[in-house]
Amino acid sequence: MNKSEITGSFDVAVVGGGPSGRIAALALAKLGLSTVLVAPTSPQSDGRTTALWQQSIELLRDLGIWDRIEASATSLRKMRMIDDTGRLIRAPEVVFDSAELGLEEFGFNILNSELNVALQELCDELPGLTVVEDTVASAELLEQETELRTQGDQKLSVRLVVAADGRNSLLRETAGIPVRRWSYPQNAVVLNLEHSLPHQHVSTEFHTPTGPFTLVPLPGRQSSLVCVETAEGADALIALSDDKLERELERRAHSILGRFKLATRPQCFPLSGLAAERLIGHRLALIGETAHVFPPIGAQGLNLSLRDIIDLTTTLGGPMRRGLDFGEDAVLKAYENKRLRDIRSRTNAVDVLNRSLLTGFLPVQIARSLSMYLAGKLGPVRRFLMHEGMTPGSGFRLKNRP
Ligand SMILES: Cc1cc2nc3c(=O)[nH]c(=O)nc-3n(C[C@H](O)[C@H](O)[C@H](O)COP(=O)(O)OP(=O)(O)OC[C@H]3O[C@@H](n4cnc5c(N)ncnc54)[C@H](O)[C@@H]3O)c2cc1C
């Protein structure tokens, strides 16, 4: 069957072929809902990597994605935070060790290119999931269904739309859901490096006055780097010759991984934020960057999106199994109620961490240094932060944990 000629009725349409959209489509089809994924053909390869925590890995495992990418994933056993602001008030170094929680690792760093290939293959293979390689051009939100029309003039009638069409979402706009947008005076320079010393599965984050400089382990003697800089600083880095860039990055990393050699070309991402004021519309649920965007600090973005997907599928599963209307407003409201707190707390935490590095305001610098000092000295504080960093709310359920 030529999948790009299909016009028809489905339980759910997922719009958007980024990682959130494809993973949601797999999860909803596996739940038993007839699902259509509307996604334009995948763009050029993505040289980034993504750190995913245990709960996200579990979801990938349940959906059969993990088997396909595990071989190229690198475990993250320790996370080191180093105050490299050079300011008068500096925090001591803090090491978060997964062994302290009785875990072998916090999670894994995966190559986006591998993830994207695996997702595309699985979406094409899964029975119950139809892929339409097209872009949604318009949506009509009717009482009992939503009608989507694609640029290729296909018409799809569905009982629920899951919008994963990214930060400039057409679906979100059609439903009239307002968003708050903001920007930061920073860019993230992203690339992969080879290095002469082993990383020993330790991710290291230097806190610098322009933002974090984070090295995350990859297979062998390689790491990915996210270097947050001012816009001018990022331009200056990218303008350097390969040799000079390698030396400059090595200097910034205090040579903790020895000599650097570029494994990929630098890419630049301006830092910005977005928060949708509501996560639902009539027969519409928002997930992923359609609902929330924040800087790539602390590896939270896709992990948060995967929690959207977990909560969406568990919310829809009950009414679906009882033969009820899983797309009605009350069900979607339950989804929104589950998600809002997590999304708002992550967005705020990343924002506060980032701004606390940029500020010259001494009381804020003292507060940041004090929290790092307490995390380094006090086991319960450290364990709380480790649990919360991976799974929201789990830090409050620590009584019986190591
Ligand atoms: C440098 C960097 C490093 C990061 N590192 C991490 C990390 O370590 N850990 C982590 O958890 N997160 C990380 N993130 C965040 C993570 O990459 C994002 O959260 C994730 O990629 C967002 O995926 P998405 O599917 O929600 O959105 P997108 O990837 O933006 O997907 C949206 C899709 O919708 C499609 N689309 C748009 N309009 C339409 C339409 N009308 N019809 C059909 N399709 C449409 C687009 O073509 C696109 O494919 C990082 C981000 C950056 C920038």
Image (spheres, rainbow, N blue to C red):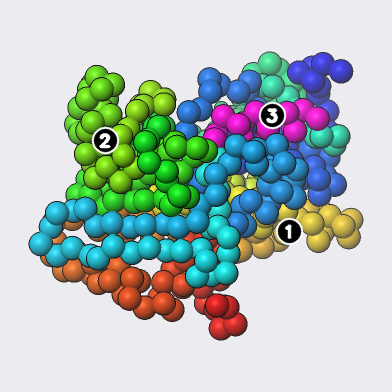
| Mark 1 CB within 8 Å of ligand 1 | no
User: Label 1's element?
Assistant: helix
Residue 113 colored in magenta in the image? yes
Q: Which secondary structure lies at badge 3?
A: helix
For label 3, the crowd category at 10 Å Cα-Cα, with few meaning under 14, some 14 to 19 and many 20 or more, is some
| First of labels 3, 1 by sequence position | 3
**Kind of residue at disc 1:** Thr
Number of other residues with Cα within 10 Å of mark 1, as a class: few under 14, some 14 to 19, many 20 or more: few
Q: Earlier in the sequence, mark 3 or mark 2?
A: 3
**In this view, 272 is above or below 349:** above
> How many badges with numbers are in the image?
3
Q: Amino acid at mark 2?
A: Leu
What's the distance in space between the residues labelled 3 and 1, CA to CA?
Answer: 24 Å
Q: From this view, report whether residue 244 is shown above or below residue 379.
A: above
Name the residue carrying label 3. Answer: 120
Q: Is residue 96 visible to us here?
A: yes
Residue type at tag 3 = Gln
Residue drawn at x 46%, y 72% is: 383
Residue lying farthest left? 88
- Which residue is at the far front? 197
On the image, the x and y values in percent for residue 40 come to 63, 23
- The residue wearing badge 1 is 314
Q: Magenta: predominant secondary structure element?
A: helix
User: Which residues fall within the magenta stretch?
Assistant: 111-125
**Any mark on residue 249, and which?**
2
